[in-house]
Image (cartoon, helix red, strand yellow):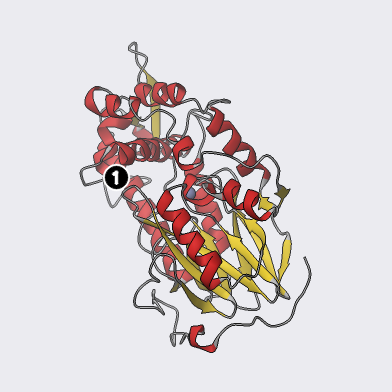
Amino acid sequence: MSASAAPQVPSSRIATVAAPASFDHLSYPHPDHPAPGTVREVAPGVHWVRMPLPFALDHINLWLLEESDGWTIVDCGYAADATREHWERLFRETMGGRPVKRIVVTHYHPDHLGLAAWIVARFGVPLYMSQAEYLTAHAVHAGVAGHHPAQILELFRRHGLQGERFDALVSRGNAYQRGVPEVPTGYFRIMDGDVMEINGRAWRVIMGYGHAPEHAALYCEDLRVLISGDMVLPKISTNVSVWAIEPDGNPLKLFLDSLARYGALPSDTLVLPSHGRVFHGLHPRVRELDVHHEQRLGELTAACGEPRMAEELIEVLFRRDLDAHQTFFAIGETVAHLNFLMYREVLERIEGEDGRYRFVRKRSALAEDYPDVL
Ligand SMILES: [Zn+2]
């Protein structure tokens, strides 16, 4: 990618962001978020776009990286008419007739990849993505390689999901196709450590694991900016789920190991997350997430004095009413925590005569691993 001159940004759009004196807590340089279809500059040439989502998560943040001769779009939004209309306005007004040069998609989830094919077709530009994310998008869209909704339901059935909660998921069908009606048929592969030069600045790809197979975050040392995608979020904890493609996987370990990589970036890094507001305080947030997961693991361990199924343990992790969409992620996340404890040799997994999995605390684990909780 070519280097280019300083961005031509109208001065009225340049925000001066004061960094906090210390970075031992989270702070938000912007008291609110930009309205859908508008932008806010959060670092020189880096613009924050917020798009609506048709489910409880409510919104996603996307990023526009400005160059003198065009734009790089990072993540594309869920395929919905409202999002397309906001993009039309951005193309027309904010992006000032300068072309889109490339799209980078952090991972295959529909709120990130949804409109990529639409933008690729419109501007004839390349899509930059990791290989695992690109291929997973195709597999989930086609419902193959363990990604068929029936296979996911069978996994959740083995973990105890039944009755109304199960039926609500049956009627979901292949929800991915609604958010991603079309997956681009070609891409440019990015790998961990790759450096993309955008507007004369180096953006380094830092892969993260556990939330999606090969999630790309982008870090610009020059600007001290991390586009963290879904890997580091300020308010909610990232979904980490076991899926049917890898029922015995340990994605929570992958996720926690990845968090440590982001936590190694400078403490004054400005974090641009996919959900919530732009924030300072990467180090305290990583610590907070570590502690949060350890607490939840301790509580699950305490709840497994008798053999329990994941379905019975959802409420240990999620202390609120869940709709079908949230249940889908909640049971996958509960299994991820249980598998983590199984590999830590705190819990044992038993397969019952009914074909269902139950988890029970190992005697040797008593008081040793989670003395505060047990
Ligand atoms: Zn995601």
- Relative side of 125 to 113, left or right: right
Q: Quarter holding the N terminus?
A: bottom right
State whether label 1 is within 8 Å of ligand 1: no
Q: Residue furthest right?
A: 2
Q: In the rendered image of this protein, does residue 336 appear above or below residue 256? A: above
Please tell me whether mark 1 sits on a helix, a strand or a loop: helix
Q: Residue 263's spot in the image, x, y percent? A: 53, 65
Q: Quarter holding the C terminus?
A: top left
**Amino acid type shown at disc 1:** Leu
Q: Of residues 134 and 360, which is closer to you in this image? A: 134
- Relative side of 34 to 12, left or right: left
Q: Residue 58's spot in the image, x, y percent? A: 34, 55
Q: Residue at x 44, y 84 (%)?
A: 22
Q: Check disc 1 and report the residue beneath it.
A: 317
Q: Residue 362's spot in the image, x, y percent? A: 36, 32
Q: Of residues 30 and 349, which is closer to you in this image? A: 30
Q: Is residue 134 visible?
A: yes
Q: Is residue 264 visible?
A: no
Assess disc 1: are there few (<14), some (14-19) or many (≥20) residues with their C-alpha within 10 Å of its C-alpha.
some
